[in-house]
Amino acid sequence: MMYRHCIYCSADLGTNQELEAFPVGRTVAFDAAKGRLWAVCRKCARWNLAPIEERWEAVEDAERRFVGSRLRVQAESIGVAKAPDGTRLVRIGTAPPGELAAWRYGSELRRRHRWFWPAVAVGVGAALVHVLPFGMAAAFAPGVYFGVAQYVGSTRRVIRIPAPESPTGEALDLRGVNVSGAVVRPGAGPGDIRLEVPTDGLWDRIRGSGARPDRPVVTLHGDAARRTVERAMPLVNAFGGSRATVGQAVTELTRHESAAAVLDSLARNGARLGVTMVTGSHRTGGAPLTGARALAFEMALHDETERRALHGELKLLESAWREAESLAAIADRLAAPGD
């Protein structure tokens, strides 16, 4: 059964009345040639790949609806149609990787960037308060504002690592202060990552406690590392990027042969994460992951996660095919004369 909430931000995906076989999402994307179907989240604009058993009838239905729609725009490889109930259908043809990446991630990253200038205006206004004659309370207001923002961002829980996957053997809560300063390094195989996470808290950072033995840097591997970085990247790229920066990120993504190669390249010498308005750790190495490189890393991370999901489906299909072949062979032997 199709999930009803975004697997990235947990927001409700909404419903549509247009696709009877797939009533999930107000924006539905599909690729009829490859048999893929996505529900696009309204909040974070991420594409949620539908389970394979939900796709075939829904993709055929979406294709019919798209062709029959009067409100549609069609390019060579991507088209958009609006159904009578307001549902948007995004049809993927033979889209080049760069064009598809720009469609999938560009709007969300540019939407985040629209919050950048209001944030800058707030910061400039707070700085001006110091020099304007608004009295003692006004002079302390900017410090209070930034202090509250630091506390909220630092204490926000990003993810909980369950005890079986935790390197400490106990459930591990990772918060903004831990993510800011974590370092991504290549894992054992192509596209694999490991994450070195400092476990000191906000007050440890403020006091400059250094490497305390009771606050070690822990290393996450496999799915735990990947899930943590997936949750962390929207905080790292909180302000998204301009059209030019997103274009540079797409170029970086298409310059490599695969998303796994992008991850390996960016993490080769260590990529240190940083969260806006949160004090970073100075105990960990690696070069800061910022700008177009950070956007490209977020894009590649989700592309590689989806590729792995599709690879898992291929294994299931192969298993089902082998089972069907064995059953067919048994049936053929039973039907043969003399058996």
Image: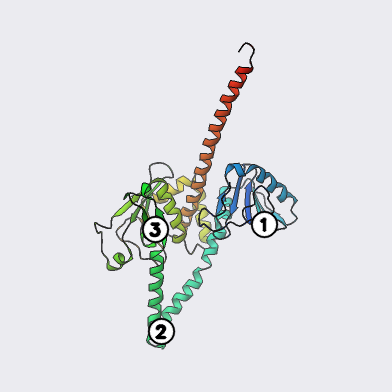
Per the model, the C-alpha gap separating discs 1 and 3 is: 37 Å
Q: Residue at x 62, y 44 (%)?
A: 55
Q: Quadrant of the C terminus?
A: top right
Circle 3 residue: 273
Q: Residues within 10 Å of mark 2 (few under 14, many from 20)?
A: some
Q: What secondary structure is found at the residue carrying circle 3?
A: loop
Q: Nearer the viewer, residue 208 or 53?
A: 53
Circle 1 residue: 87
Dots 2 and 1: beta carbons under 8 Å? no
Circle 2 residue: 138
Task: Give the residue at the far left of this rendering.
Answer: 213
Q: Find residue 230 and report its horizontal and vertical position in percent.
A: 45, 53
Looking at the rendered structure, the kind of residue marked 3 is Leu
Looking at the rendered structure, the kind of residue marked 1 is Thr
Q: Earlier in the sequence, mark 2 or mark 1?
A: 1
Does residue 267 lie above or below 119 as drawn? above
